[in-house]
Amino acid sequence: MSGLTHFDSTGASRMVDVSAKPETLRTARASGLVTVSPSTFELIQGGRMTKGNVYEVARLAGILAAKRTGELIPLCHPLGLDSVEVSFDPRPPGTIAIESRVAMHGRTGVEMEALVAVSVSALTLYDMCKAVDREIVIGPIQLEEKTGGQRGDYRRGASGADDS
């Protein structure tokens, strides 16, 4: 099981001990796409969805989810995040790009928190629009970059980048 930090030498699951690591600034940025029909896109953009402001509800859901990642993902550390931002970039005729940015001074990274923020924001968009559009597609969702930590920085697409 060498190299897999969430397993001990016998293959048993474990939470990684980060107590000896120094606190550093950790950041992560994740992205995702939600594709809806052009008519649903127009309803969202026009503020005419019956459940309310789709973007603001999805933003709040993503922020809340990032803060609760340690409760959702079994081996994630519960973290006191310093900052969580979720933004939306509507792209006609029917794509909504979602981006999250998470930052914290701590001993472990915030990649999972950024990914969870995007995922739950996307699921909330789906939930708020499913009554008018059953063909909604979510994905891909991916880590774009992270900074801080022993393994250094990562940026998607950078050659030779360490992706852990």
Image: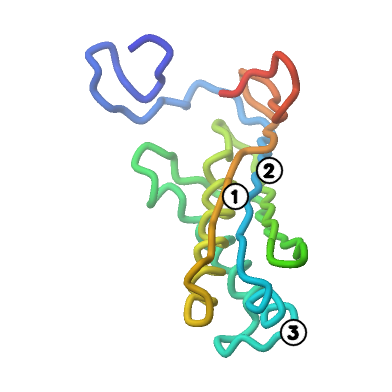
| Disc 1 target residue | 81
**Picture residue at 70% right of the left edge, 13% below the top:** 160
Q: Quadrant of residue 11?
A: top left
* SS type, badge 2: strand
The answer for how far apart the CA atoms under marks 1 and 3 are is 33 Å
Residue count near mark 1 (Cα–Cα under 10 Å), binned few <14, some 14–19, many ≥20: some
Residue count near mark 3 (Cα–Cα under 10 Å), binned few <14, some 14–19, many ≥20: few
* SS type, badge 3: loop
**Picture residue at 38% right of the left edge, 51% below the top:** 71
| Disc 2 target residue | 29
Look at label 3 and name its amino acid: Gly
| Disc 3 target residue | 46
Q: Nearer the viewer, mark 3 or mark 2?
A: 3
Q: Nearer the viewer, mark 1 or mark 2?
A: 2
Q: Classify 117 as above or below 157.
A: below
Look at label 1 and name its amino acid: Leu
The answer for how far apart the CA atoms under marks 1 and 2 are is 14 Å
Q: Camera-side residue: 39 or 89?
A: 39
* SS type, badge 1: loop
Mark sitting earlier along the chain (1/3): 3
Residue count near mark 2 (Cα–Cα under 10 Å), binned few <14, some 14–19, many ≥20: many
Percent across and percent down for residue 65 are 50, 58
Disc 3 + disc 2, Cβ < 8 Å = no
Percent across and percent down for residue 66 are 54, 54
